[in-house]
Amino acid sequence: MYEKKIPLPLECGLMMTREILGGKWKPNLLLAISVGISRPSQLHREIPQSTKRVLNLQLKELEEFEMIEKKVYHQLPPKVEYRLTERGKSLMPLLQQMNEWGEKNRPFIKSIILKRTKALD
């Protein structure tokens, strides 16, 4: 796994939150799990732009931070489900506000992204 060269400032709450939510798909995973999408295959279908490997790594990190719990059913075929922990549920208002802000500012942000893309061409 990647090892950071610059130590994380542990006295900063914003950095703590970024450590948990930092990752391209972590907020999407948390929101999907919060609405009942619990199986890995469902999560992969919900976020088709991602790779299974990246989603699995980010699910593992969210599990390490106890934002989600993984339940393994010992049966054939094997079955795995994820659910939010209380700590994970406490992030939902923040994620919902971030989503609302993004939706409200979508036209402006989209125009900037398109300008950047055209500038690179």
Image (cartoon, helix red, strand yellow):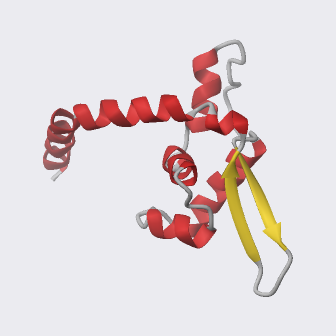
Instruction: Identify the residue at the far top of this view.
Output: 11
Q: Residue furthest bottom?
A: 76
Query: Is any part of residue 2 visible from this angle?
Result: no
Question: Furthest residue to the right?
Answer: 74
Q: Quadrant of residue 46?
A: bottom left
Residue 73, image x, y percentages: 81, 72
Residue 58 picture location, percent across and down = 63, 52
Residue at figure coordinates x 77%, y 45% from the top left: 64
Along the viewing direction, whichever of 13 and 87 lies nearer the viewer = 87
Looking at the image, residue 101 sits to the left or right of residue 40; the answer is left
Q: Nearer the viewer, residue 110 or 88?
A: 88
Q: Is residue 79 left or right of residue 55?
A: right
Rendered residue at 51%/53% (across/down): 32
The answer to which of 120 and 53 lies nearer the viewer is: 53
Q: Is residue 51 left or right of residue 4?
A: left
Vertical relation: 49 (above or below) 69: below
Query: Image point 18% across, 36% down: which residue?
Result: 112
Q: Is residue 49 left or right of residue 92?
A: left
Across and down, in percent, residue 67 comes to 69, 41
Q: Residue at x 62, y 68 (%)?
A: 40
Residue 83 visible in the current orientation: yes
Q: How many marks?
A: 0
Q: Quadrant of residue 5?
A: top right
